Image (cartoon, rainbow, N blue to C red):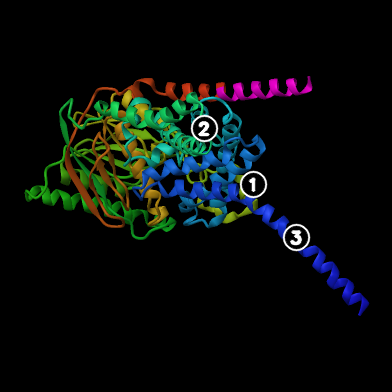
Amino acid sequence: MTVTATSVGESDDVQPRTAPAQRARLPRLVPAATAALSGVLLYVSFPPRTLWWLALPAFAAFGWVLRGRSVKAGLGLGYLFGLGFLLPLLVWTGVEVGPGPWLALVAIEALFVALVGAGVAAVSRLPAWPVWAAAVWIAGEAARARVPFHGFPWGKIAFGQADGVFLPLAAVGGTPVLGFAVVLCGFGLYEVISLAVEARRTRAIPRSAAITALLSLAVPPLAALAALPLVSDKAQTGTATVAVIQGNVPRAGLGFNEQRRAVLDYHARETERLAAEVKAGKAARPDFVLWPENSSDIDPFANPDARTVIDRAAKAIGAPISVGGVVERDGRLLNEQILWDPEKGPLDTYDKRQIQPFGEYLPLRSLLDMINKSWTSMVRQDFSRGSEPGVFTLDGTKVGLATCYEAAFDWAVRDTVTHGAQMISVPSNNATFGRSEMTYQQLAMSRIRAVEHSRTVTVPVTSGVSAIILPDGTISQRTGMFVADSLVQEVPLRSSETPATRFGVLPELALVLVAAGGLGWAVAVRVRGRRAGDV
């Protein structure tokens, strides 16, 4: 009985000490939960939803959790924000290969966001901190677009703004300036709310802080309004009637590669169906035709039957076709666009330069083979990179080519325009990713590119969504998913260069330097503070 009494007494004594400890621990979880949930909120702002404005409260909440924190805390909170954002955004990467590669990709990419979180925490004590913090975010995006394995810029803030009021800023300085404006406005929103709360409590706030907060919130949308004259869908060098062919695939997923001849036949059949409509006067005669990436995975240079199918389709429509083929040349496997003339056959080629790691080539192949042989069996032979920008002259029109994954990279689209492209085509193959959000995310990228370079952009896709996008970012026509269809339209051709086209990487470099300046200042302030404490 004595033992029982003692046990009960000890239990009663522990209880009051444990409850306060748990209550004290709860506030510490609030910033972590807020960081993760604000990352989810940022994801919700991305396509296929048109809730672009949710990016502002997402960054406002992110600013709240980071403001005044230590660098170490910023690192952890940034990682949680990155996970909340990227886990749902990139779930399509595991559609056919399982969760392993998806989770590994997110874990690595979220490290960049963690470093950004640490940087934002470091500069958050500086005057005008939203400016430094927004620049730090863009510096993180710049790094993520380049390393590892030549980078992975998917999820740039700019790519979620195709329907937003900030869109005209893409023509000013490309995706870095557009993204900077959104992040700055989000951090500015937090600062305005924070100062308003402080004013109610103390009846006084520093004037300089109030001005900085209001400017951070107001300048980005005002700048976008001022940039509106740069956005136009007017023709400058005439027009062209273009046909976009979506042939569809026998079934979704990786298995479509096993039915390569069927995919080729489907695209030829849809082109011949369009030719019949043109002959019957039901559709306009196109000046040229655009097929998607992988529309002929059978090498037409090595297989006479594939050559015959393409030849027949080109002759039926009576116009040159840009064909997406898989070609082996000199021992190199190439993802190639082929300019196919109805009379002369293949005249020109463009080899994809920014090939997809773990999709078109396998880094660390021997290591992956030890982990999971099924992954390496999916990519039996690595594709090789092309080296020259792709600009086809199709019936007198210069068409720039950025194949699928390349649309995510600023340089891969820009240099087609600097090499004379009057419009841009983004041939893609999204069948591997089924009905996931991937195709809508990529379509939004193409809309950003249209405004960035003031060019019509066509998006021919094997299984959808194919689209024709005007130079102002408007989708004028689109198909459904997993249907055979064609789009025919007279589109404006343009020759002028936007500031974004002319400046190229310079705006991004300037913002990276701003970020470096802010971080350097923050470090100097901390060092001075430590020295003063020592004294």
Q: Nearer the viewer, mark 2 or mark 3?
A: 3
Disc 2 to disc 1, C-alpha distance: 22 Å
In contact (CB < 8 Å): disc 2 and disc 3: no
N-terminal label among 2 and 3: 3
Disc 2 to disc 3, C-alpha distance: 49 Å
Kindly report the secondary structure that dominates the magenta region of the rendered protein: helix
- 521 in the magenta segment: yes
- Give the secondary structure at mark 1: helix
Q: Residues within 10 Å of mark 1 (few under 14, many from 20)?
A: few
Residue 12 against residue 456 in the figure, above or below = below
Residue 277, percent from left and from top: 12, 51
Q: Looking at the figure, which quarter contains the C terminus?
A: top right
Name the kind of residue labelled 1 in the image: Leu
Q: Nearer the viewer, mark 2 or mark 1?
A: 2
153 vs 398, left or right, is right
Residue 274, percent from left and from top: 16, 50
- 363 in the magenta segment: no
For mark 2, what is the residue?
146
Q: Which disc, if any, is residue 367? A: 1
- Closest to the observer, 152 or 135: 135
Residue 242 position by quadrant: top left
Q: Nearer the viewer, mark 3 or mark 1?
A: 3
Residue 406, percent from left and from top: 41, 37
Q: Residue at x 16, y 32 (%)?
A: 239
Residue range corresponding to the magenta coloring = 518-535
Disc 3 to disc 1, C-alpha distance: 47 Å
Name the kind of residue labelled 2 in the image: Arg
Q: Residues within 10 Å of mark 3 (few under 14, many from 20)?
A: few
For mark 3, what is the residue?
18
